Amino acid sequence: MVHTPAHSGIGGALTYESDAVHVPGTLVRVPLGKRELLGIVWDATDAGQVAPPENTPPDEQATLQLRPISSVLEGIAPLNAHWRQLVQFAASYYQRSAGEVALAALPSQLRDLTPEQWDRRLKRKPKATSPYESTAPHIPTATDEQAQALADIAANTGPFLLYGNTGSGKTEVYLRAAQSVLEQDATAQILVMVPEINLTPQLEERFRARFCPQWGTDCLVAMHSSLTPAQRLKNWLAAHSGEARIVLGTRMAVFASMPHLQLIVVDEEHDPSYKQQEGARYSARDLAVYRGQLEGAKVILGSATPSLESWHHSRPATDTQSAGRYKRLAMPSRVGQGALPLVRRVDMNRQPYKTVFSNHLLDAMRERVTRGEQILVLLNRRGYAPVLSCHDCGWKSECPHCSAYRVFHKLDRTLRCHHCGFTQPVPRACPSCGNLDISPLGRGTEQLEEHLAELLADVRRPDGEPIRIARIDADSTRLKGELERQLAEVHAGAVDVLVGTQMIAKGHDFRRVTLVAALNPDGALFSSDFRAPERLFSLLMQAAGRAGRDASMQTTSPCEMWVQSFHPLHPLFEALKQHDYPAFAEQQLKEREQATLPPFSFQALVRAEARSQEAAQGFLNAARDVGAALADELLVDLYPAVPMTIQRVANIERAQMLIECTSRKALQHFLAHWQGDLHGLRSAHKQVIRWAVDVDPLAI
Ligand code: ADP
Ligand code: ZN
Ligand code: ZN
């Protein structure tokens, strides 16, 4: 049968002819131009439409000759209707094409293997995996709070917001909820999402230890970006075939094909890394909630510091407002009576100029290390110093390609741009005036590590050995496996003081940490990004949560969190002192409501990049003019184009435009109609290199 080609809109499906009828969801190879690409039979029409590979430009789609499907990928069951609907929804919500979303969600080897390689792959016998070597798992008795949360999960449909303090045993709740799903249904599958798998390698081990003895080594597969293409294909197939009962993965796992999905867990649901920052800029957390509803799977979002969106969605009913759509489950207590740390604030205004560690803090650190306790020092700035400068002429280590300074890295004596990567050796003398005396301004983790080594040089561990200081940040963990190795050292107790960026604050269960110090957290208090305080508060709460996880470590003195700030009385630190997330959330939500910011409104950003700021803004402002009438009608606000905070990266000028509306539906309606205009405008704005829409952006 021959059909006329579908003159599809942007990113619509393409039509191919085929002798046989293919079930929707079938994976096929199709010709496009001179290439042969992976496609998915999308529609139930008799010809079968194929979601176009990548972001096929509209002109290429329109001139397409109707050609036959080259071949079908044998041996793979079609992707089911739920999966296709999830993709379709994500594509339309985030303003991308279904083909792009679908194909990005599939393992690259499905695309890259030739038909011959694929045949060989199929014939390969699965290696017999060795049985999981472990005795029956030790399952602790649930605490009352855990039992209550589990009973609520069993009795309701959700979605659930598990608001559990750090160390309250949220993971144990996930494990038990998973257990009961696995036991009730011999085919049921579970998706567990975590922000960054490398940061919490123990979590995978905890799941394995719990489930592999009973359900076998292959019952759990991982899905994240550090797998090899072959591993990713293998794990994807295991989930798709239903053989893997549990998928543990990062945001990309939300698109895992799981035909019997019954439970989705999103751990640390507030974490910004659930938002994809390129291509389709989806929120895996939000898609998880959608997917749960679509497939009738229960969804548990867990956090000690939920996103304000989820907090608001889980509000209980009051006299004046209705209850949110999520069910909030609270676990306020720590397991085993480990107390939350005492928060101590140091007023840096009263410290001598250029103080790094106040004397009080230093004394406390010495005392604890001497007793064999561990310390975390948090500074959210890597490198040695953020700027190198000349005192004579005022030269600073600006990046020639970006509107940012290059960071001084002392270890390899380089100036490195953290935005474009441009790296040069540190100059011997000031490039501008020749002065030999150029010096670092400000402080990063590298310098802090060096400085601490001097300050604590005379301190000994209980065994008389000198103390060990280690640093974990993006620089120290660049090599594969390095992060895991360093974390293992901290766990093993080989490290006494750990210096690091936010990487050290995430879900680690370090047992001997009794003091956490946050240096210089003030930047976020006065940021132009309205989410900065939320992020800072959650970072500090998470960091505090690393202390005192083992009650037996607190016999001598209670564990502590120290905050050195020039604004110690700021309400954010007051709330931190009380460990009072609800108070902080309430105050922030009040401010957001007054300013009609999310979750009381909905936002999207259009970003454009060009050689000049003028060209980037010109495109955005033209887009604004085209959309003005419809925006007016729908009560959508279109703001003028502005340069991005970091305006120039790698010699590309960047601008953005904010779109805001109190109705999600109206905003979606507007974006859907406007999308075509934006594509149309592009040809009149040839200088624009790239543009993209970000729906529900996390950073403004
Ligand atoms: P969270 O994820 O909320 O920070 P975890 O699940 O990591 O907390 O639990 C903190 C610690 O308490 C872990 O070491 C865990 O093994 C232990 N734990 C959790 N639940 C129980 C329980 N019911 N009985 C004893 N120990 C528990
Ligand atoms: Zn100079
Ligand atoms: Zn740069």
Image (tube, rainbow, N blue to C red):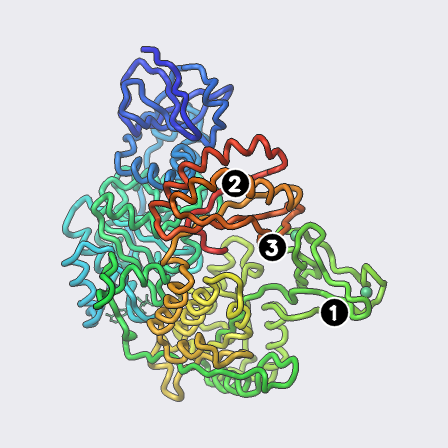
Residue 270 % position (x, y): 38, 60
Q: CA distance from mark 2 to mark 3?
A: 25 Å
Circle 1 is placed at which residue position?
439
What's the amino acid at mark 2? Asp
Label total for image: 3
Q: Indicate the amino acid at tag 1.
A: Ser
User: Label 3, on which residue?
Assistant: 646
Amino acid on which disc 3 is placed: Ile
Q: Position of residue 439 (x, y in %)?
A: 74, 69
Residue 428: quarter of image: bottom right
Label 3: state its secondary structure: strand
Left or right: residue 503 compared with residue 686: left
Eyeballing the image, is 242 above or below 158? above
SS for callout 1 = strand
Residue for badge 2: 625
| Beta carbon at label 2 within 8 Å of ligand 3 | no
